[in-house]
Structures are given as C-alpha cells and as structure tokens.
C-alpha cells in the first residue's frame, strides 16, 4: 500500500513555478477561483516536489493557479503535498494531471445546478461555478428541453475543419436529418442529434 502523503504548510516564498507548466486558465475562471478561496478558505493542496537546484525550495507540479490565487489573496503559507518524483516523472505529470479528468454527466450536472439554485441566484452561481450565467440557466432548464432518451448523453467535443463546399454539404445533410420532435432542444443539440442519426443510418446501411 502506498504511503499516505501528509499535507505540509509551506511558505509562499519557497514555492517555485515549473517552467514547463502548460495549463492555462481564462481570466474569468481565475477570478472565480480567487473568489471561491476568498469566501470559503478551502482549496485542494498544491502538489510540489523538492527543488533540485534550489535547496530548501519546492517546485510546483500541480496547482499553479491555486498558488497564484493564494498569492493574490495575500497568503503567506500554502498547504502542499510533497511528492518524491524526478525530472522525467515530473514532466509526465505536468502533461497528464490537468488532462486525465472525467466528464460531467449532463443530467447530474443539471440536478446539481438546480439544487444550488434553490438557495443561490444565477448571478451569484455564475461567480462561483465554471459556467456563465446563461450556461447555468440552460442547465437549470435542461431536463425539460431534452427528451428522456437522451438522458445519459455526455458532452464530448469533436473538432474538425472543412472547406466552404464541404460545410454547405454537411449543413444541408444536418438540416435534412432534423427531427420535428427536437423543436424544444437548442439549435446545437438538434444538429448533434441530426449528426447521430446520419451516423446510425450509415452504420445500419453498411451492416
């Protein structure tokens, strides 16, 4: 069984950002992070390792934005967990810790937002959650707008680039595949369901 790492309180002056940290956070999300820590005082411990070239200092492996937020709030010490990792292991962690994440189940996210909305208004929620105010409103109304058959759908981005001619062809096909029963859904959802129907039709025809 792996040794349980204890949380250590380390002086802000001893923490050094890793030069290869590639994770970036938008200004709006960073403001929300600062606001959350300011109000609650809670945050996930920052993951660090002992600095190889500066004795007594620690290099941040995960939690650069938390450290920046705490610094902005005037914190003198940061709660950290010290990992014993070398340069190669640290490089791998920098490339994975902010990417190996699950995705929200849309309906469960909607339920959570609705529960929060019973005591907190949308404007205040938008200051705390990653979603914008419009995004929160959409989540609140999601169950009424989505057919029950779609309840287990997950949000997975698919990005590709097409020429103008290909775009016109794809949009024409999506329009033809629209289901009149989807009128209560958003335009983006209708396009997604059209694309799924086209894919299902193709797979069924080739079976």
Image: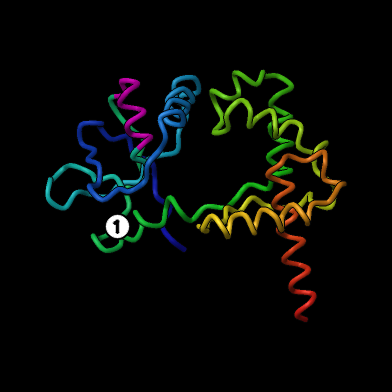
Does residue 73 show up magenta in the picture? Answer: yes
Q: Which residue is drawn at 33% across and 48% down?
A: 22
Task: Kindly indicate the quadrant of the structure image that contains residue 125.
Answer: top right
Q: Percent x, y for residue 41?
A: 46, 24
- 36 or 28: nearer the viewer: 28
> Does 141 sit above or below residue 24?
above
The picture places residue 53, in percent across and down from the top left corner, at 12, 50
Name the one closer to the observer, 200 or 58: 200
Q: Residue at x 45, y 38 (%)?
A: 44
Residue in the picture at 70% in, 32% down: 138
The region drawn magenta spans 65-75
| Name of the residue lying farthest toward the right | 181
In terms of secondary structure, where does tag 1 sit?
helix
Residue beneath disc 1: 90
Asked whether, in this view, residue 93 is left or right of residue 166, the answer is left
Q: In this view, does 83 lie above or below 27?
A: below
């Amino acid at each position: 069984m792996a040794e349980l790492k204890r949380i250590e309180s380390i002086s802000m002056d001893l923490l050094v950002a890793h030069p290869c940290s590639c994770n970036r956070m938008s200004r709006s999300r960073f403001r929300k992070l600062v606001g959350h820590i300011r109000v609650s005082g809670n945050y996930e411990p920052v993951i660090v390792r002992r600095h190889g070239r500066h004795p007594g200092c620690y290099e941040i492996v995960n939690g650069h934005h938390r450290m920046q937020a705490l610094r902005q709030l005037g914190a003198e010490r940061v709660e950290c967990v010290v990992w014993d990792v070398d340069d190669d292991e640290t490089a791998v962690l920098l490339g994975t810790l902010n990417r190996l994440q699950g995705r929200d189940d849309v309906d469960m996210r909607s339920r959570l937002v609705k529960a929060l909305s019973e005591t907190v208004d949308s404007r205040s929620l938008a200051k705390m959650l990653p979603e914008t105010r419009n995004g929160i409103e959409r989540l609140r109304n999601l169950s009424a707008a989505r057919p029950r058959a779609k309840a287990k759908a997950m949000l997975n981005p698919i990005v590709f680039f097409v020429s103008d001619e290909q775009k016109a062809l794809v949009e024409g096909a999506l329009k033809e595949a629209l289901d009149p029963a989807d009128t209560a859904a958003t335009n983006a959802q209708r396009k997604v369901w059209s694309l799924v129907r086209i894919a299902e039709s193709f797979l069924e025809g080739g079976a």
